[in-house]
Image (tube, grey):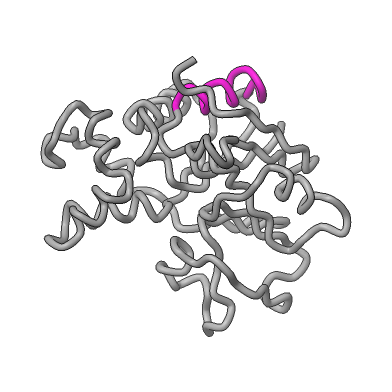
Amino acid sequence: MSRYAISDIHGCLATFRYLVEEELKLQPTDTLYLLGDYIDRGPDSKGVIDFILELREKGYPVITLCGNHEELMLQARKEPEYPEIWLHNGGVETLKSFDTLSLEAIPAKYWTFLEELELYVELDDYLLVHAGFDFSLPNPFTDRRSMLWIRDFEVDKTVLGTRKIVHGHTPTYLTDIQASLQEPLEDDLNIDGGCVFTSRLGYLTALNLDTLKLHAVANREGK
């Protein structure tokens, strides 16, 4: 019974599937926490969502959080000024994965998936979120924008207690992720290895929340 966290898959289905099936060898007794940004930029955003839904259908506990790219896609559907912003941030690749040029042609089950994403998960030992929290606010757990978009934030230990924050959103070199997991452990742990950015970063990582073992797979798209 292990708990794993993965963030920022960005349409890299081959890498994601390999990490889950071959590296983690995920079991139905494990829990998989996905911290957002399943879509955009990479080659198969639709396939990533399909694989998540497939895992759930097979009985695997998969908890899915919202990332800023899912937020952009949802806004592109609802607000006239957002489609261009989304398209310029990887939305073109997402539409290609659905073999369409129209948001309206995307089947309803994918919109349901996006609309049901959670903003954060609170565990006894961790807070899981896509980007982070703005602890300068009276209640950081109500600020949607910060949880999806914030880059740098100061941790308030009176709120956090002994827990650690695990998040993604900001692409980070694998060596820096590994360093953050050494003692003394940092309060916020960024596990975004920048999988889709193969020229600079290029890793998809999974953090075992129970052992702090980091599993890392280099981008496998096209293999």
The quadrant of the rendering that contains the N terminus is top right
In this picture, residue 40 sits left or right of residue 126 = left
Picture coordinates of residue 78, whole percent (x, y):
16, 57
**Residue for point 73% across, 75% down:** 157
Decide whether residue 17 is among the magenta residues: yes
The residue positioned farthest toward the top in the image shown: 223
**Residue for point 42% across, 23% down:** 54
Q: How many labels does the image show?
A: 0
Q: Quadrant of residue 10?
A: top left
**Residue for point 15% across, 41% down:** 103
Residue nearer the viewer, 96 or 131: 96
**Residue for point 48% across, 37% down:** 196
Residue nearer the viewer, 12 or 30: 12
Picture coordinates of residue 153, whole percent (x, y):
60, 72
In this picture, residue 148 sits left or right of residue 111 = right
Decide whether residue 109 is among the magenta residues: no
The residue positioned farthest toward the front in the image shown: 199
Picture coordinates of residue 66, whole percent (x, y):
42, 51
141 up-or-down from 202: above or below: below
Residue nearer the viewer, 79 or 124: 79
178 up-or-down from 130: above or below: above
The residue positioned farthest toward the right in the image shown: 183
In this picture, residue 43 sits left or right of residue 59 = left
Picture coordinates of residue 131, whole percent (x, y):
52, 59
Range of the magenta residues? 13-26
46 up-or-down from 157: above or below: above
Please identify the dominant SS of the magenta region. helix
